[in-house]
Amino acid sequence: QLQLQESGPGLVKPSETLSLTCTVSGGSISSSSYYWGWIRQPPGKGLEWIGSIYYSGSTYYNPSLKSRVTISVDTSKNQFSLKLSSVTAADTAVYYCARGYSGYCSGGSCYFLDYWGQGTLVTVSS
Amino acid sequence: SSELTQDPAVSVALGQTVRITCQGDSLRSYYASWYQQKPGQAPVLVIYGKNNRPSGIPDRFSGSSSGNTASLTITGAQAEDEADYYCNSRDSSGNLVFGGGTKLTVL
């Protein structure tokens, strides 16, 4: 059974860089059928996609966050990471990592997130 | 990037059928996926593709799509189905997008 676990500081100061790591167990992060993503959820609000990284190394970022986001993969540790720079209180949220599938299914193009971490709350405050 | 629009709240009587919809231009090209989220928990994938359920998801959950609208139907809603539901797809640029979520109340 695939498991994902987020880790990193729960408190970050304004203007600093938020750094989180997602450790994948029970499967390889190098599988060509999947991609790896970060999603966040501010308290009481909906889900927001932050960005994704494919096994090829290609990255896709939410246009609204693109200038501040970097997602990378460490295949030797079976981990992928998120860096979000210049944070403000608006970046306070539960941050989730997830595995995504991108490909053909049901006679069409499918994109879905089938495994999620439990989420970690990151608060931006001085 | 493309947007996905959901009704903020929907209610259904216990045992009845409810449909939750998601609208967006990207749904003309890509299937939506649907997620159930209960308070304090991570989202759970309930429907993907044309109408596929991951292992462990009850068959009362089903999906459909027509034009720019994707739908999640719960046939015979149970008390444990009360949750927030989110649709998700991608746009032509490869970016993922979530709908704003629908809060389902089971009466």
Image: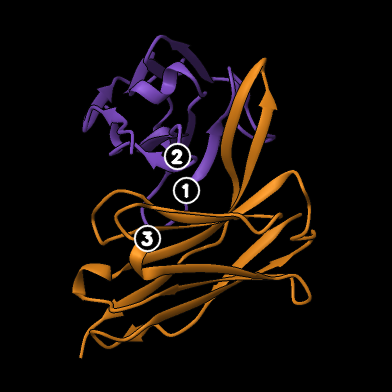
Chain colours: A orange, B purple
Asked if one can make out residue B106 in the rendered structure from this viewpoint, the answer is: no
The image shows residue B43, relative to residue B33, as above or below, that is below
Q: Percent position (x, y) of residue B66?
A: 43, 8
- Horizontal and vertical percent for residue A60? 50, 52
Q: Which residue is mark 3?
A: A66
List the residue tagged with mark 2. B36
Single out the mark in the foreground, 1 or 3.
Answer: 3
Looking at the picture, which amino acid does disc 3 mark? Lys
C-alpha gap between disc 3 and disc 2: 27 Å
Do the numbered discs 3 and 2 sit on residues whose CB atoms are within 8 Å?
Answer: no
Q: Is residue A43 above or below residue B5?
A: below
Q: Which residue is mark 1?
A: B43
Residue at left offset 21%, top offset 33%: B8
Q: How many numbered marks appear?
A: 3
* Quarter of the image where the N terminus of chain B is located: top left
Q: Mark 1 falls on what kind of element?
A: loop
Residue at x-position 77% and y-position 48%:
A32
| Of B79 and A70, the residue lying toward us | A70
**Above-or-below relation of A63 to B57:** below
